[in-house]
Image (spheres, rainbow, N blue to C red):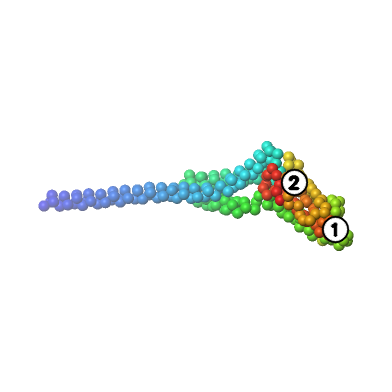
Amino acid sequence: MLSHIREAIHAEFNCEKQWEEKQWVKEVLRHEKQPVMLDLLRVLIAVVTGLFSLPALLFGGYFLACWIRIHTSDVFYVEYPYLTAALVFGGIGISCAFCSVYGALRRNCDGFIFVIPFVFGLATASYIPDGTPHIQRSMMNDGNFLSHTRSFLPVWYESHQRFPTDEGEFREALKQGAAAWHEVSPRFESDYAKGGKRLQYKVVIIRDATGPKLDGLSDQPGVIYYCVSGDNQRFWVTMTSLHQDVSGFASF
């Protein structure tokens, strides 16, 4: 009888010991799985946020390509600090990529580091569509010059009963129109350059015209075609420009 009791107690003890061992193993596995899941989550977040470094890297690469083309080819371009812009955007892209990789490799790193590439990536992506030089600079200034021309020449017409017929009168008409409108006279220095030299707006006078000049245009950007009718009572103005930041020829 005593031996049966001892066997029962021993069996119960073994069961409790096995249960405790199972619980210990489960606890160990649970603690081992938790860091693995966190690591996988960090890697996933790093990959996603790392993609947000691409806009700055690509934009920086674009400016670097423009800078290289300007210094190795005979092209027209919009005056702009291309190399500086390439270094700035490239630095932003590399920093964003570093934050993503660093956040994935360091377990004790604050998850806030993943916010940096996300914020800068969105900001760069929203800046790119209107951030190119030909949109920020030349397109705006060319439009302003044409707008001022169409507004200021009628002032000359009121005092002379005709529109200008040569470049001297054209420039004088712009000055008189600017004074009448209480504005600054349009500057004839364009935003275009070639070979490191800034280009001036060039005025081409076409008399006895019946409409604007739309063909046979110059390859140089910033050429203004001022067309005036035979009776000097009507005029048309067109201009060549760059629709790209760097190009071998201008377009209408």
197 to 226, vertically: above or below:
above
Q: Where is residue 176 in the image (x, y as percent from the top left)?
A: 85, 57
Q: In this view, does 15 lie to the left or right of 85?
A: left
Residue 138 in view, yes or no: no
The mark closer to the camera, 2 or 1, is 1
Residue in view at x 52 percent, y 52 percent: 112
Q: In this view, does 47 lie to the left or right of 251?
A: left
Q: How far apart are marks 2 and 1 (CA)?
A: 26 Å
Contact check, label 2 and label 1, Cβ < 8 Å = no
Residue in view at x 49 percent, y 48 percent: 47
Under circle 2, the secondary element is loop
Give the residue at mark 2: 218
Q: Where is residue 9 in the image (x, y as percent from the top left)?
A: 19, 51
Q: Which mark is residue 17?
A: none
Q: What residue type is labelled 2?
A: Ser
Residue in view at x 53 percent, y 48 percent: 51
Under circle 1, the secondary element is loop
- Earlier along the polypeptide chain: callout 2 or callout 1? 2
Mark 1: few, some, or many residues within 10 Å (few <14, many ≥20)? few
Q: Nearer the viewer, residue 52 or 180?
A: 180
Q: Where is residue 113 in the image (x, y as percent from the top left)?
A: 53, 50
Residue 63 in view, yes or no: yes
Mark 2: few, some, or many residues within 10 Å (few <14, many ≥20)? some
Q: In this view, does 230 lie to the left or right of 40?
A: right
Q: Which of 39 and 229 is in front in this view?
A: 229
**Farthest top residue in view:** 72
Q: Where is residue 207 in the image (x, y as percent from the top left)?
A: 83, 52
Give the residue at mark 1: 231
Residue in view at x 46 percent, y 47 percent: 43
Q: Nearer the viewer, residue 18 or 194?
A: 194
Q: Which amino acid does label 1 sit on?
A: Asp
